[in-house]
Image (tube, coloured by chain):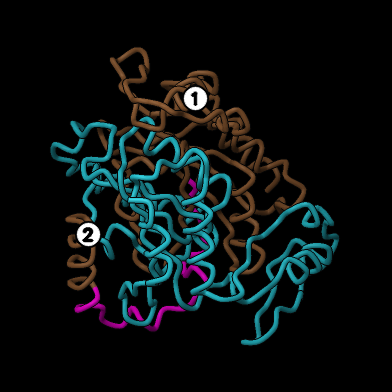
Chain colours: A brown, B cyan
Amino acid sequence: MSEILNEVLDANETYSADFGDKGNLAMPPKRRFAILTCMDARLDPAKFAGLAEGDAHVIRNAGGRASDDAIRSLIISYKLLGTREWFLIHHTDCGMETFTNEVIRDLLANSLETAEFNGEKWRDVGKGPGSRAGEYIEFLTINNLEQSVIDDVERIRSHPLVPKNIAIYGFIYDVKSGRLIEVPEANRIGRAAI
Amino acid sequence: MSEILNEVLDANETYSADFGDKGNLAMPPKRRFAILTCMDARLDPAKFAGLAEGDAHVIRNAGGRASDDAIRSLIISYKLLGTREWFLIHHTDCGMETFTNEVIRDLLANSLETAEFNGEKWRDVGKGPGSRAGEYIEFLTINNLEQSVIDDVERIRSHPLVPKNIAIYGFIYDVKSGRLIEVPEANRIGRAAI
Protein backbone atom coordinates (compact mmCIF):
# COMPACT_ATOMS: atom_id res chain seq x y z
CA MET A 1 0.00 0.00 0.00
CA SER A 2 1.16 3.53 -0.77
CA GLU A 3 2.74 5.42 2.10
CA ILE A 4 0.45 8.41 1.52
CA LEU A 5 -2.66 6.21 1.51
CA ASN A 6 -1.51 4.65 4.78
CA GLU A 7 -0.89 8.03 6.38
CA VAL A 8 -4.25 9.43 5.26
CA LEU A 9 -6.12 6.39 6.60
CA ASP A 10 -4.19 6.53 9.89
CA ALA A 11 -4.98 10.23 10.28
CA ASN A 12 -8.63 9.49 9.49
CA GLU A 13 -8.69 6.74 12.12
CA THR A 14 -7.47 9.23 14.72
CA TYR A 15 -9.94 11.92 13.62
CA SER A 16 -12.97 9.61 13.60
CA ALA A 17 -12.04 8.03 16.95
CA ASP A 18 -12.70 11.39 18.58
CA PHE A 19 -15.61 12.55 16.42
CA GLY A 20 -17.77 13.68 19.34
CA ASP A 21 -21.21 15.00 18.40
CA LYS A 22 -20.15 16.08 14.92
CA GLY A 23 -22.21 13.17 13.58
CA ASN A 24 -25.32 15.18 14.41
CA LEU A 25 -24.50 18.23 12.29
CA ALA A 26 -27.16 19.27 9.79
CA MET A 27 -26.51 19.54 6.06
CA PRO A 28 -27.11 23.33 5.65
CA PRO A 29 -24.11 25.46 6.69
CA LYS A 30 -24.84 26.77 10.19
CA ARG A 31 -23.23 30.18 9.61
CA ARG A 32 -24.80 30.54 6.17
CA PHE A 33 -21.79 31.52 4.14
CA ALA A 34 -19.48 30.07 1.51
CA ILE A 35 -15.82 30.52 0.62
CA LEU A 36 -14.49 30.13 -2.92
CA THR A 37 -10.71 29.89 -2.93
CA CYS A 38 -7.67 28.23 -4.50
CA MET A 39 -6.64 24.57 -4.15
CA ASP A 40 -3.13 25.74 -3.12
CA ALA A 41 -1.66 23.46 -0.46
CA ARG A 42 -0.60 26.38 1.75
CA LEU A 43 -4.21 27.53 2.23
CA ASP A 44 -6.35 26.06 4.99
CA PRO A 45 -9.63 28.00 4.80
CA ALA A 46 -11.01 26.39 7.97
CA LYS A 47 -7.98 27.69 9.84
CA PHE A 48 -7.49 31.07 8.20
CA ALA A 49 -11.19 31.96 8.36
CA GLY A 50 -12.10 30.22 11.63
CA LEU A 51 -14.47 27.47 10.49
CA ALA A 52 -15.67 24.55 12.55
CA GLU A 53 -17.23 21.53 10.87
CA GLY A 54 -20.77 22.42 9.83
CA ASP A 55 -20.16 26.17 9.51
CA ALA A 56 -19.71 27.03 5.84
CA HIS A 57 -19.36 25.68 2.31
CA VAL A 58 -15.84 25.64 0.92
CA ILE A 59 -15.34 25.54 -2.85
CA ARG A 60 -11.81 25.24 -4.22
CA ASN A 61 -10.20 24.99 -7.64
CA ALA A 62 -6.97 26.04 -9.35
CA GLY A 63 -6.85 29.79 -8.73
CA GLY A 64 -10.10 30.05 -6.79
CA ARG A 65 -11.64 31.19 -10.06
CA ALA A 66 -15.35 31.88 -10.62
CA SER A 67 -15.54 29.08 -13.18
CA ASP A 68 -18.88 27.74 -14.41
CA ASP A 69 -18.40 24.86 -11.98
CA ALA A 70 -17.78 27.16 -9.02
CA ILE A 71 -20.94 29.08 -9.97
CA ARG A 72 -22.87 25.78 -10.21
CA SER A 73 -21.72 25.08 -6.64
CA LEU A 74 -22.61 28.58 -5.38
CA ILE A 75 -26.11 28.33 -6.88
CA ILE A 76 -26.71 25.03 -5.06
CA SER A 77 -25.19 26.61 -1.95
CA TYR A 78 -27.78 29.42 -1.70
CA LYS A 79 -30.80 27.96 -3.47
CA LEU A 80 -30.94 24.69 -1.57
CA LEU A 81 -28.73 25.23 1.45
CA GLY A 82 -29.33 28.87 2.34
CA THR A 83 -25.95 30.65 2.24
CA ARG A 84 -26.25 34.47 2.20
CA GLU A 85 -22.63 35.72 2.01
CA TRP A 86 -19.80 34.58 -0.23
CA PHE A 87 -16.05 35.15 0.06
CA LEU A 88 -13.96 35.05 -3.12
CA ILE A 89 -10.33 34.64 -2.04
CA HIS A 90 -7.31 34.51 -4.35
CA HIS A 91 -3.77 34.52 -2.93
CA THR A 92 -0.24 35.83 -3.40
CA ASP A 93 2.39 33.63 -5.07
CA CYS A 94 -0.36 31.74 -6.94
CA GLY A 95 0.80 29.16 -9.46
CA MET A 96 -1.84 30.50 -11.85
CA GLU A 97 0.25 33.65 -12.31
CA THR A 98 3.24 31.68 -13.63
CA PHE A 99 1.87 30.47 -16.97
CA THR A 100 -0.60 31.02 -19.80
CA ASN A 101 -2.87 28.72 -21.79
CA GLU A 102 -0.19 28.57 -24.48
CA VAL A 103 2.54 27.58 -22.03
CA ILE A 104 0.68 24.71 -20.38
CA ARG A 105 -0.75 23.48 -23.69
CA ASP A 106 2.78 23.25 -25.09
CA LEU A 107 4.05 21.50 -21.96
CA LEU A 108 1.22 18.95 -22.13
CA ALA A 109 1.75 18.39 -25.84
CA ASN A 110 5.36 17.55 -25.04
CA SER A 111 4.82 15.05 -22.20
CA LEU A 112 2.53 14.06 -19.32
CA GLU A 113 5.32 14.34 -16.77
CA THR A 114 5.80 17.16 -14.28
CA ALA A 115 7.51 20.26 -15.69
CA GLU A 116 10.18 22.36 -13.97
CA PHE A 117 10.02 26.05 -13.07
CA ASN A 118 13.25 28.04 -12.91
CA GLY A 119 11.66 31.01 -11.18
CA GLU A 120 10.75 32.64 -14.48
CA LYS A 121 9.79 29.98 -16.96
CA TRP A 122 8.36 26.48 -17.15
CA ARG A 123 10.43 23.90 -18.98
CA ASP A 124 9.34 20.40 -19.87
CA VAL A 125 11.84 17.74 -18.87
CA GLY A 126 9.60 14.73 -19.37
CA LYS A 127 9.60 12.08 -22.06
CA GLY A 128 6.69 11.97 -24.45
CA PRO A 129 4.23 11.14 -25.68
CA GLY A 130 2.19 14.12 -24.57
CA SER A 131 -1.33 15.01 -25.63
CA ARG A 132 -2.80 17.93 -27.52
CA ALA A 133 -6.04 17.66 -25.53
CA GLY A 134 -4.97 20.75 -23.56
CA GLU A 135 -5.99 22.84 -26.59
CA TYR A 136 -9.60 22.29 -25.53
CA ILE A 137 -9.15 23.50 -21.96
CA GLU A 138 -9.33 27.12 -20.80
CA PHE A 139 -6.97 27.06 -17.82
CA LEU A 140 -8.20 30.35 -16.26
CA THR A 141 -4.71 31.62 -15.51
CA ILE A 142 -4.17 34.90 -13.66
CA ASN A 143 -2.41 37.89 -15.16
CA ASN A 144 -3.08 40.43 -12.41
CA LEU A 145 -4.06 39.19 -8.98
CA GLU A 146 -6.19 42.13 -7.88
CA GLN A 147 -7.92 42.28 -11.25
CA SER A 148 -8.72 38.55 -11.14
CA VAL A 149 -10.51 39.09 -7.82
CA ILE A 150 -12.47 42.01 -9.26
CA ASP A 151 -13.30 40.10 -12.46
CA ASP A 152 -14.46 37.02 -10.56
CA VAL A 153 -16.63 38.96 -8.12
CA GLU A 154 -18.13 40.81 -11.07
CA ARG A 155 -18.78 37.54 -12.92
CA ILE A 156 -20.63 36.10 -9.94
CA ARG A 157 -22.47 39.36 -9.20
CA SER A 158 -23.82 39.62 -12.72
CA HIS A 159 -24.91 35.99 -13.07
CA PRO A 160 -28.67 35.76 -13.72
CA LEU A 161 -29.10 33.05 -11.06
CA VAL A 162 -27.35 34.97 -8.27
CA PRO A 163 -29.80 36.99 -6.17
CA LYS A 164 -29.00 40.63 -5.51
CA ASN A 165 -29.22 40.31 -1.73
CA ILE A 166 -26.25 37.97 -1.42
CA ALA A 167 -23.12 39.83 -0.31
CA ILE A 168 -19.92 38.95 -2.18
CA TYR A 169 -16.58 39.91 -0.65
CA GLY A 170 -13.28 39.92 -2.54
CA PHE A 171 -9.99 39.22 -0.74
CA ILE A 172 -6.39 38.27 -1.37
CA TYR A 173 -4.77 35.86 1.09
CA ASP A 174 -1.10 36.62 1.71
CA VAL A 175 0.80 33.32 1.91
CA LYS A 176 3.72 35.05 3.65
CA SER A 177 1.68 36.37 6.58
CA GLY A 178 -1.57 34.38 6.60
CA ARG A 179 -3.57 37.61 6.38
CA LEU A 180 -6.67 38.35 4.33
CA ILE A 181 -6.30 41.63 2.43
CA GLU A 182 -9.40 43.37 1.18
CA VAL A 183 -9.82 44.24 -2.50
CA PRO A 184 -11.98 47.39 -2.10
CA GLU A 185 -13.10 47.59 -5.73
CA ALA A 186 -14.23 43.94 -5.64
CA ASN A 187 -16.11 44.53 -2.42
CA ARG A 188 -17.81 47.57 -3.90
CA ILE A 189 -19.02 45.52 -6.87
CA GLY A 190 -19.87 42.51 -4.75
CA ARG A 191 -22.05 44.46 -2.37
CA ALA A 192 -23.45 47.01 -4.78
CA ALA A 193 -26.85 45.41 -5.04
CA ILE A 194 -27.55 44.99 -1.34
CA MET B 1 -20.27 45.56 8.72
CA SER B 2 -21.73 42.09 8.50
CA GLU B 3 -21.37 39.91 11.58
CA ILE B 4 -19.94 37.06 9.51
CA LEU B 5 -17.37 39.33 7.84
CA ASN B 6 -16.33 40.58 11.28
CA GLU B 7 -16.00 37.07 12.65
CA VAL B 8 -13.97 35.86 9.67
CA LEU B 9 -11.59 38.82 9.89
CA ASP B 10 -11.22 38.36 13.65
CA ALA B 11 -10.44 34.67 13.19
CA ASN B 12 -7.95 35.57 10.47
CA GLU B 13 -6.28 38.08 12.78
CA THR B 14 -5.80 35.36 15.38
CA TYR B 15 -4.51 32.85 12.82
CA SER B 16 -2.02 35.22 11.21
CA ALA B 17 -0.75 36.50 14.57
CA ASP B 18 0.63 33.03 15.22
CA PHE B 19 1.70 32.13 11.68
CA GLY B 20 5.14 30.83 12.65
CA ASP B 21 7.31 29.67 9.76
CA LYS B 22 4.37 28.86 7.49
CA GLY B 23 5.32 31.92 5.44
CA ASN B 24 8.28 29.93 4.10
CA LEU B 25 6.28 27.06 2.65
CA ALA B 26 6.93 26.29 -1.03
CA MET B 27 4.20 26.31 -3.65
CA PRO B 28 4.33 22.59 -4.65
CA PRO B 29 2.46 20.30 -2.24
CA LYS B 30 5.08 18.72 0.03
CA ARG B 31 3.36 15.34 0.24
CA ARG B 32 2.58 15.30 -3.48
CA PHE B 33 -1.07 14.42 -3.41
CA ALA B 34 -4.45 16.02 -4.04
CA ILE B 35 -7.94 15.54 -2.65
CA LEU B 36 -11.09 16.20 -4.67
CA THR B 37 -14.15 16.34 -2.44
CA CYS B 38 -17.49 18.03 -1.77
CA MET B 39 -18.01 21.64 -0.58
CA ASP B 40 -20.26 20.28 2.22
CA ALA B 41 -19.82 22.30 5.42
CA ARG B 42 -19.45 19.17 7.57
CA LEU B 43 -16.29 18.07 5.75
CA ASP B 44 -12.89 19.37 6.82
CA PRO B 45 -10.40 17.54 4.57
CA ALA B 46 -7.38 18.91 6.44
CA LYS B 47 -8.77 17.39 9.63
CA PHE B 48 -10.22 14.13 8.31
CA ALA B 49 -7.15 13.34 6.19
CA GLY B 50 -4.46 14.82 8.43
CA LEU B 51 -3.13 17.72 6.34
CA ALA B 52 -0.87 20.49 7.54
CA GLU B 53 -0.52 23.69 5.51
CA GLY B 54 1.71 22.98 2.51
CA ASP B 55 0.93 19.25 2.31
CA ALA B 56 -1.64 18.70 -0.45
CA HIS B 57 -3.96 20.32 -2.97
CA VAL B 58 -7.62 20.38 -2.01
CA ILE B 59 -10.24 20.79 -4.75
CA ARG B 60 -13.90 21.09 -3.73
CA ASN B 61 -17.20 21.59 -5.51
CA ALA B 62 -20.84 20.61 -5.07
CA GLY B 63 -20.67 16.81 -4.81
CA GLY B 64 -16.91 16.47 -5.19
CA ARG B 65 -17.62 15.65 -8.82
CA ALA B 66 -14.98 15.11 -11.51
CA SER B 67 -16.26 18.12 -13.44
CA ASP B 68 -14.24 19.65 -16.29
CA ASP B 69 -13.13 22.31 -13.82
CA ALA B 70 -11.95 19.75 -11.26
CA ILE B 71 -10.02 18.00 -14.05
CA ARG B 72 -8.50 21.36 -15.10
CA SER B 73 -7.31 21.73 -11.51
CA LEU B 74 -5.94 18.16 -11.31
CA ILE B 75 -3.99 18.63 -14.54
CA ILE B 76 -2.34 21.78 -13.17
CA SER B 77 -1.78 19.91 -9.90
CA TYR B 78 0.38 17.17 -11.45
CA LYS B 79 1.82 18.85 -14.54
CA LEU B 80 3.14 21.95 -12.83
CA LEU B 81 3.11 21.09 -9.13
CA GLY B 82 4.02 17.42 -9.09
CA THR B 83 1.20 15.55 -7.32
CA ARG B 84 1.32 11.76 -7.84
CA GLU B 85 -1.76 10.43 -5.97
CA TRP B 86 -5.33 11.67 -6.01
CA PHE B 87 -8.21 10.98 -3.61
CA LEU B 88 -11.77 11.29 -4.92
CA ILE B 89 -14.05 11.51 -1.90
CA HIS B 90 -17.84 11.75 -1.95
CA HIS B 91 -19.88 11.54 1.27
CA THR B 92 -23.02 10.17 2.86
CA ASP B 93 -26.08 12.43 3.24
CA CYS B 94 -24.91 14.55 0.29
CA GLY B 95 -27.27 17.29 -0.85
CA MET B 96 -26.59 16.25 -4.44
CA GLU B 97 -28.61 13.06 -3.82
CA THR B 98 -31.76 15.05 -2.98
CA PHE B 99 -32.59 16.58 -6.36
CA THR B 100 -32.27 16.33 -10.14
CA ASN B 101 -31.54 18.86 -12.88
CA GLU B 102 -35.29 19.18 -13.45
CA VAL B 103 -36.04 19.86 -9.78
CA ILE B 104 -33.48 22.63 -9.31
CA ARG B 105 -34.25 24.17 -12.71
CA ASP B 106 -37.92 24.42 -11.73
CA LEU B 107 -37.04 25.88 -8.32
CA LEU B 108 -34.79 28.52 -9.92
CA ALA B 109 -37.39 29.37 -12.55
CA ASN B 110 -39.82 30.03 -9.71
CA SER B 111 -37.63 32.29 -7.54
CA LEU B 112 -34.07 33.09 -6.49
CA GLU B 113 -34.82 32.53 -2.82
CA THR B 114 -33.82 29.50 -0.77
CA ALA B 115 -36.11 26.49 -1.15
CA GLU B 116 -37.30 24.17 1.62
CA PHE B 117 -36.74 20.44 1.94
CA ASN B 118 -39.30 18.35 3.80
CA GLY B 119 -37.07 15.27 4.03
CA GLU B 120 -38.34 13.97 0.72
CA LYS B 121 -38.97 16.85 -1.64
CA TRP B 122 -37.82 20.38 -2.35
CA ARG B 123 -40.51 23.05 -2.37
CA ASP B 124 -40.06 26.65 -3.43
CA VAL B 125 -41.43 29.12 -0.93
CA GLY B 126 -39.83 32.23 -2.44
CA LYS B 127 -41.35 35.10 -4.33
CA GLY B 128 -40.41 35.51 -7.99
CA PRO B 129 -39.11 36.50 -10.35
CA GLY B 130 -36.89 33.50 -10.90
CA SER B 131 -34.71 32.79 -13.90
CA ARG B 132 -34.71 30.07 -16.53
CA ALA B 133 -30.90 30.26 -16.81
CA GLY B 134 -30.68 27.00 -14.87
CA GLU B 135 -31.71 25.19 -18.07
CA TYR B 136 -28.16 25.76 -19.32
CA ILE B 137 -26.46 24.24 -16.28
CA GLU B 138 -25.70 20.56 -15.75
CA PHE B 139 -25.86 20.28 -11.96
CA LEU B 140 -24.04 16.92 -11.71
CA THR B 141 -26.45 15.49 -9.16
CA ILE B 142 -25.89 12.07 -7.62
CA ASN B 143 -28.28 9.17 -8.02
CA ASN B 144 -26.19 6.42 -6.42
CA LEU B 145 -23.33 7.40 -4.15
CA GLU B 146 -21.05 4.44 -4.76
CA GLN B 147 -21.64 4.61 -8.51
CA SER B 148 -20.82 8.33 -8.57
CA VAL B 149 -17.43 7.57 -7.00
CA ILE B 150 -16.79 4.84 -9.56
CA ASP B 151 -17.94 7.03 -12.46
CA ASP B 152 -15.80 9.97 -11.38
CA VAL B 153 -12.66 7.89 -10.85
CA GLU B 154 -13.25 6.33 -14.26
CA ARG B 155 -13.72 9.77 -15.87
CA ILE B 156 -10.42 11.00 -14.43
CA ARG B 157 -8.60 7.73 -15.19
CA SER B 158 -9.58 7.81 -18.84
CA HIS B 159 -8.81 11.50 -19.45
CA PRO B 160 -6.16 11.87 -22.18
CA LEU B 161 -4.18 14.38 -20.06
CA VAL B 162 -4.00 12.17 -16.96
CA PRO B 163 -0.84 10.04 -16.88
CA LYS B 164 -1.20 6.34 -16.17
CA ASN B 165 1.23 6.35 -13.25
CA ILE B 166 -0.92 8.58 -11.05
CA ALA B 167 -2.84 6.56 -8.47
CA ILE B 168 -6.51 7.49 -8.02
CA TYR B 169 -8.34 6.34 -4.90
CA GLY B 170 -12.12 6.38 -4.47
CA PHE B 171 -13.69 6.83 -1.02
CA ILE B 172 -16.94 7.73 0.68
CA TYR B 173 -16.72 9.90 3.80
CA ASP B 174 -19.34 8.97 6.40
CA VAL B 175 -20.67 12.20 7.95
CA LYS B 176 -22.05 10.24 10.93
CA SER B 177 -18.71 8.74 11.96
CA GLY B 178 -16.04 10.83 10.22
CA ARG B 179 -14.64 7.67 8.62
CA LEU B 180 -13.36 7.18 5.08
CA ILE B 181 -14.87 4.08 3.49
CA GLU B 182 -13.14 2.53 0.51
CA VAL B 183 -15.01 1.97 -2.75
CA PRO B 184 -13.12 -1.11 -3.97
CA GLU B 185 -14.35 -1.00 -7.57
CA ALA B 186 -13.29 2.67 -7.87
CA ASN B 187 -9.87 1.85 -6.44
CA ARG B 188 -9.48 -1.02 -8.87
CA ILE B 189 -10.20 1.30 -11.81
CA GLY B 190 -8.17 4.17 -10.36
CA ARG B 191 -5.05 2.08 -9.89
CA ALA B 192 -5.43 -0.25 -12.86
CA ALA B 193 -2.81 1.49 -14.95
CA ILE B 194 -0.04 1.59 -12.37
Image x and y of residue B174, in percent:
38, 77
Instruction: Classify residue B163 by image quadrant.
Output: top left
Q: Amino acid at mark 1?
A: Ala
Image x and y of residue A42, in percent:
29, 41
Image x and y of residue A22, in percent:
33, 78
Tell me which segment is drawn in magenta. Answer: A16-36
Instruction: Classify residue B98 by image quadrant.
Output: bottom right
Image x and y of residue B5, in percent:
46, 50
**Residue placed most toward the observer, A163 or A20:** A20
The residue located at (22%, 45%) in the rendering is B31
Name the chain under label 2.
B
Examine the structure image and report whether residue A27 is included in the region drawn in magenta: yes
**Residue placed most toward the observer, A109 or B28:** A109
Is A43 positioned to the left or the right of B25 in the image?
right
**Residue placed most toward the observer, B124 or A111:** A111
Furthest toward the left, the residue is B21
Mark 2 highlights which residue? B50
Mark 1 highlights which residue? A109
The local secondary structure at tag 2 comes to loop
